[in-house]
Image (cartoon, helix red, strand yellow):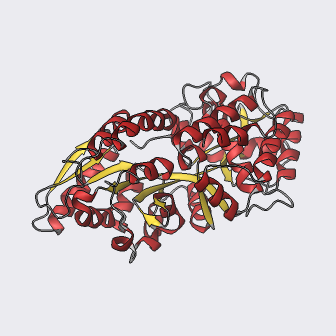
Amino acid sequence: MSIRRRTYGALVMAASLALVTACGSGGSTGSDAAGGATTWWHNGTQDPLKSVWERAAAAYEKAHPGAKLDVVPIQNEQFPTKVPLALQSDNPPGVYFNQGGGLLATQAASGRVADITDRTKSWIKDLGAAAQGWASDGKQYGVPYASHVVGFWYRKDLFAKAGITKAPATMDELKSAVTALKAAGTVPIALGGKDRWPDAFYYNYFAVRECSVETLKSSVAKAKFTDQCFTRAGQDVIDLIALKPFQPGFNGTPAQQGTGSSAGMVAAGQAAMELQGDWNPGVMQGLTSDPSYKAELGWFPFPSIAGAAGDPSVALGGGDGFSCTTKQADACVDLLKYLTSAEVQTDLISSGAATIPVNPAAEAAIKDPVVKEVFSYNSKASYVQVYFDVALPTAAGQALNDAVANLFAGQGDAGSVARAVNSAG
């Protein structure tokens, strides 16, 4: 199964600690085209992803006489320790799973992750903005196979009951919708604050809407949030909390665990909206035996902010992908090209192993009309800002998440998140 956001914070923290040791240990650089099987570490230990990768490996070997893949499924929780150790060894895998961003950039600094810029330049553009999250300093260090995007999942029936006739496109419209829903006796927004990372989605998106793309890129690259747009994002969070749009006790509510979670509340019609990733319908499916919510579920992008520098077409998201070590870079890139082909991408979507393909050629495999809307928005995004806790160096990303969670707990001020990043970066 794919990694949902609920697991990532712990993974990157453990990875950071392990990689510090690995990067300082030296070791040989490995060799390309060393012959023999190409070892492929992936996280598909369960179906449907496990079977998708088994089918892909078999088809790849059949289509490439002489090629041999040593496919190794590994539990998510083992990657943070296994990858750093592998990168300092003489026998790293040729291909390994990662989620791009700041952690990949840190791994690349070890010198053991292959720069695949030239090897992918003829086809990487077909994957659109999603591939940017696997690049650092203008160099491509990996390739995604699935995209993720965050937006508001909402109940059409509860919006209609409150007299809301269209999805909010601006922040003023969102705030009006909150007022209307409260007047109708409905919890406007469910929030899984116990897990903390859902809190960060709000700060992330407010920053994306307040800051220009150039500011986002340069600030993440420097791990310094000194532009005033990041302080305005903090004030936006405070202003939204002041409207009291969330359910009582939201800081103690889990995001995805149990029927009382934030996802479970929307599935049961106990709340009208939730700011979550594309994976949310799948989460809801496991939280209720009543499938009627599916017909009432809609989606809209995070609203624009009047007068702000942020581009409304910029999306917040991430993805799952693979990187190559210098050991067998050519063989690795050839496999990654195949994994992003229409054939494999269609299998990922049709099987339910992924929600949003990186290859538009697999769009036809998406059957849910709402997910099609999400795919279309993500495909047309002028830029995809990777979640800050992934895009930033691990310490800065964790500091950001902690500071945002403090804001939701009533602690801090408009500039406290930016100061936390600046202190850690």
What quarter of the picture does the C terminus occupy? top right
In percent of width and height, residue 259 lies at: 58, 26
**Residue that sits furthest to the bottom in the current view:** 122
Q: Residue at x 69, y 33 (%)?
A: 403
- Nearest to the observer: residue 51 or residue 298: 51
Q: Nearer the viewer, residue 318 or 367?
A: 318
Quarter of the picture holding the N terminus: top left
x and y percentages locating residue 149 in the rendered image = 58, 53
Q: Is residue 333 above or below residue 42?
A: below
Residue 180 left/right relative to 284? right
162 lies left or right of 316? right
Q: Residue at the location (47% across, 38% down)?
A: 12
- Give above or below for 195 relative to 400: above
Specify the quadrant of the image occupied by residue 400: top right
Closer-to-camera residue (143/299): 143
Q: Quadrant of residue 423?
A: top right
Who's the residue at 48% across and 32% down the image? 10
Relative image position of residue 120 (x, y in whole percent): 37, 71
* Res 77 visible: yes
Picture residue at 61% right of the left edge, 64% below the top: 383
- Is residue 176 or residue 87 the one in the foreground? 87
Q: From the top left corner, tell me how far across and down residue 147 is, in percent.
A: 49, 55
